[in-house]
Amino acid sequence: MYLIDEKSSTPLHIQLYQALKEDIISNFSVGQKLPSIRKIATLYNLSKNTVASSYNQLYAEGYIESRPKRGYFVTDMYFDGFKAGEKLSQTSKEEKKIYRYDFFPAQLSKDSFPLKLWKRIYTKVIDESLDFGAYHDGQGEEGLREQIASYLIDSRGVRCHAKQIVITSGFGESMGLLAKLVKDKYQILGMESPGYHVARRAFEEYGYEIEKIEVNEKGIVIDALKDSPAQIVYITPSHQYPTGVAMPIANRLSLLEHIQSINGLIIEDDYDSELSYENRPIPALQGLDKYDSVIYMGTFSKSLSPAIRVSYMVLPKHLLAGYHDSFDFYFPKVSLITQKTLEHFMAQGHWDRHVRKIRILNKKKHNLMRNELKRLLGDTMEIVSQGGGLAILINPTLAFDWEKFKTLAKEKSIKLYFAKERCGGEFEAIRMGFGGFSEEGIAEAVEVFSVVWKKALII
Ligand SMILES: Cc1ncc(COP(=O)(O)O)c(C=O)c1O
């Protein structure tokens, strides 16, 4: 029986509609017949109009269908996941453990974001230059694309025009879009191994075959790539993910030549190019390309904020027509307010200043972590990669009880990250992220870490 309260302020037909809906979701099966309007009206002493109006609402929402002369039946749309006992929990997410010392290798500290400045520009943008009534350019705001193009030309040596830039809400979106765009022509992606799992997964989703290509101290091994059937190759040439090596110029040229000879494509992921602490950032490979065969990908996640969700890619000119054919009917994924704020932030010179500042700040943190690790772990540790990005990679030099290390770290509220976990391949290293800590926090975190480390050494 349904509870229908005549004194309630909720109209009777709404009360009945809600009760029926609950009942259908929890107890009815697909194709089951509902009681007739007349029967419900008699049972609950309601007018037939009231009941009909509840049924109409259920019909409009797709819960039931009407079969002529036979009555109303539960439709077969969507129900399986909503049966009794399977209602979606409001607190479905497993509670996330908070660690006191989290060495996440892709994190910035909260206070490194230029909040005051951002707020000021944001407010100005809302007051002065936003049209809240309109849909905006799906490729990204032209003004922001112009700013990014001029930054890439000046600072990364990329050859591009704003027309070639597509703003996305992240690397995964860029890769998915690209995978879809070129899938009629290409089927096999060559991936650095170890490499960034998101790149592989995005292409796998579109049915590409993945060829793992080994990485050595010069980045992806070009001969191995040549021996493979890969037609497109994903690389991180300026700071290989996760090993940190840089691809020398000779290899860059040889890679370009190979890709041109097979009429293939290179995806250059320049994810943390701003964060180079020991030498000047290496110019992008895209700038060397004479054949229009490089798709350049960049992000604001490493130097500004991973929370604002702004990334971009530079498409070669020959892919632009296909891009517009396939994607012009999508609307932008990054909100106009964020895009415009970033555009003004860049146009007023704050981005260049911020990059300089963040490089100095992160260099300090990098050096502090390296020095603390050396001081506390000495020869028991080797540094596998340093000098850029947001993490230093280390390994033990002595026999090591890895299980004990992981268990003790957890007990001390230390969150660890291992290269193999995410990147595949044989390369292993502990990824000591420093970006998320304050300068004082680094010393404390490494101190606690060193106690755990020493207990895991087998001496
Ligand atoms: C190798 C690599 N590429 C790209 C990205 C950028 O991702 P997004 O722009 O989605 O924040 C990351 C982030 O950690 C990364 O590690």
Image (cartoon, helix red, strand yellow):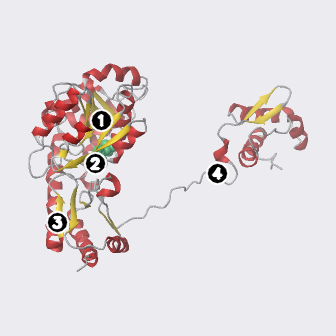
- Residue 15 shows which numbered tag? none
Q: Earlier in the sequence, mark 3 or mark 4?
A: 4
Q: In the picture shown, does residue 284 fall above or below 453? A: above
Residue 150 shows up from this direction: no
Q: Viewer-nearest of labels 3 and 4?
A: 3
Nearest the viewer among 385 and 41 is: 385
Q: Secondary structure at mark 3?
A: strand
Residue position marked by numbered label 4 in the rendering: 87
Q: Viewer-nearest of labels 3 and 2?
A: 2
- Residue 230 shows which numbered tag? 1
**Circle 4 residues within 10 Å: few <14, some 14–19, many ≥20:** few
Residue position marked by numbered label 2 in the rendering: 193
Label 1 CB-ligand 1 distance < 8 A: no
Residue position marked by numbered label 3 in the rendering: 382
Q: CA distance from mark 3 to mark 4?
A: 51 Å
Label 2 CB-ligand 1 distance < 8 A: no
Nearest the viewer among 228 and 157 is: 228
Q: Earlier in the sequence, mark 3 or mark 1?
A: 1
Q: CA distance from mark 1 to mark 2?
A: 14 Å
Based on the displayed image, in which of its 4 quarters is residue 171 positioned?
top left
Percent position (x, y) of residue 434? 23, 60
Q: Earlier in the sequence, mark 3 or mark 2?
A: 2
Based on the displayed image, in which of its 4 quarters is residue 349 positioned?
top left
